[in-house]
Amino acid sequence: MSEIKITAEPRPDFGKGYARRIRAAGNIPAVIYGNGKEPKHVILPGHETTLAVRNKDAVLVIEVDGEQFKTRVQDIQRHPIRPELQHIDLLFVD
């Protein structure tokens, strides 16, 4: 099992328009949830994340504002025609 470290930004705004702007900038909107913890909404770098999620068993270490969270991919939403990731759901791993 490999660990891949990704630096993310917090996602302060929500909605379709904000998500489209995030994608237009080459990033991916994501949410980290699970284990009874408060969900964290983040912006992941597009290319780095796309390469990281190719391996289904990978553990992603997401760093947001100095905090690190170990996560696994729960769900990926892909564009129906283009090879793009639209949104990623990540689960906390203890």
Image (tube, rainbow, N blue to C red):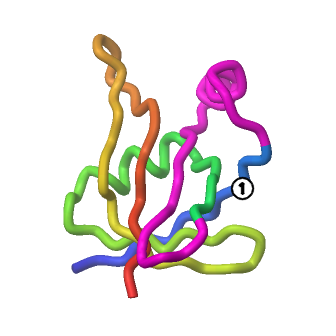
Q: Residue 17, percent across and down? A: 69, 19
The amino acid sitting under disc 1 is Glu
Left or right side of 13 for 16: left
- Residue at image position (57%, 41%) is 29
Q: Residue 94, percent across and down? A: 39, 88
Residue 36 against residue 14 in the figure, above or below: below
Q: Residue 47, percent across and down? A: 49, 42
Residue 24 against residue 63 in the figure, above or below: above
- Residue at image position (77%, 38%) is 13
- Residue at image position (36%, 20%) is 79
Q: Residue 86, percent across and down? A: 45, 30
Q: Which residue carries the number 1 mark?
A: 9
Q: Quadrant of the N terminus?
A: bottom left
Residue 36 colored in magenta in the image: yes
Task: Give the quarter of the image for residue 6.
Answer: bottom right
Left or right side of 36 for 40: right
The residue stretch that appears in magenta: 13-38
Left or right side of 15 for 91: left
State the residue lying farthest toward the front.
36
